[in-house]
Image (tube, helix red, strand yellow):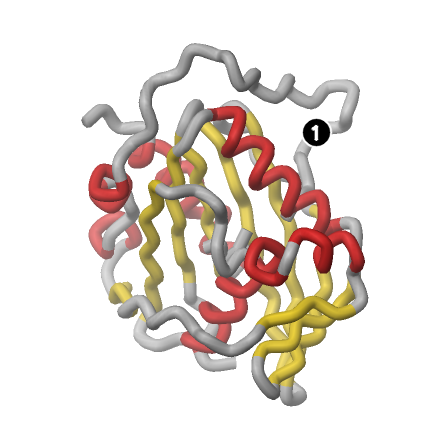
């Protein structure tokens, strides 16, 4: 698939971006979700988040930032996964994570299809971030296969839980397989919550693994 297609598909799923869970820990050892009453710093602004996104210098020579595409207006629906359907198409596909403070950047390596990576940053209360991203990841992984219909395009989706690195306060990770028009792509999505900031890195599995810790460190940098 062309780079921009893979990036758009990743956005459809969470990219946000949307938007899957698969905790890296067993329930018995999973970290306790934050309380709504926990004392936490105020959320960062979207401007502050934009300043903490990865850039070409962080990724290395040969990477270029790709322009953000305008939001699609086609009706998006989920087929074959009642839990995701119940959440609503926008939430289920990650087209619109319900966090008001956000920043996003996507990159390509010399136009290579297998060298796409994107990052999303969100900020809100720790409890809201945990509940929002956890609910969506859990719903997605509950349906190993389903379909996403966008306009006249039907995408066959597959999800597989993968282990997330022990970073931040909570972690989620999965592999998403997209099949459409006889072409197949695999995108890894890993999300890490650290306090009131959520980092989501999506793209080629190797690039996600290589840049996740870097993305988290930059997102945590003091203002």
At a point 21% along the width and 51% down the height, the residue shown is 57
Secondary structure state at the residue bearing disc 1: loop
Residue 3: x percent and y percent? 43, 75
How packed mark 1 is, by other alpha carbons closer than 10 Å (few <14, some 14-19, many 20 or more), is: some
Residue 148: x percent and y percent? 66, 71
Residue 106: x percent and y percent? 35, 61
Kindly indicate the quadrant of the structure image that contains residue 117.
bottom left
Q: Could you tell whether 94 is left or right of 48 in the image?
A: right
At a point 60% along the width and 87% down the height, the residue shown is 152
**Relative to 202, does residue 47 appear above or below in the rendering?**
above
Kindly indicate the quadrant of the structure image that contains residue 12.
bottom right
Q: Quadrant of the C terminus?
A: top left
At a point 52% along the width and 81% down the height, the residue shown is 1
At a point 45% along the width and 55% down the height, the residue shown is 17
Residue 38: x percent and y percent? 49, 12
Kindly indicate the quadrant of the structure image that contains residue 33.
top right
The answer to whether one can see residue 160 in this image is: no
What residue does disc 1 label? 25
The mark total stands at 1
**Relative to 185, does residue 215 appear above or below in the rendering?**
above
**Relative to 72, does residue 216 appear above or below in the rendering?**
above
In front of the other: 220 or 101:
101
């Amino acid at each position: 698939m062309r780079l921009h297609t893979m990036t758009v598909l990743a956005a459809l799923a969470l990219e946000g971006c949307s938007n899957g869970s698969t905790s890296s820990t067993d329930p018995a050892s999973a970290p306790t979700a934050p309380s709504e009453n926990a004392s936490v710093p105020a959320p960062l602004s979207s401007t502050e988040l934009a300043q903490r996104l990865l850039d070409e210098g962080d990724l290395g020579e040969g990477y270029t930032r790709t322009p953000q595409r305008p939001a699609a207006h086609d009706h998006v629906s989920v087929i074959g996964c009642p839990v995701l359907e119940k959440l609503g198409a926008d939430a289920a596909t990650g087209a619109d994570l319900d966090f008001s403070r956000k920043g996003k950047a996507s990159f390509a390596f010399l136009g290579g299809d297998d060298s796409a990576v994107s990052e999303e940053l969100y900020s809100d209360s720790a409890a809201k971030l945990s509940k929002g991203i956890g609910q969506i990841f859990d719903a997605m992984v509950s349906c190993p296969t389903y379909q996403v219909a966008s306009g006249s395009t039907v995408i066959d989706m597959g999800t597989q839980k993968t282990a997330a690195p022990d970073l931040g306060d909570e972690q989620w990770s999965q592999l998403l397989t997209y099949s459409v028009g006889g072409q197949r792509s695999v995108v890894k999505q890993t999300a890490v919550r650290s306090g009131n900031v959520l980092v989501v890195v999506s793209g080629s599995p190797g690039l996600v693994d290589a840049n996740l810790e870097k993305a988290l460190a930059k997102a945590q940098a003091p203002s």
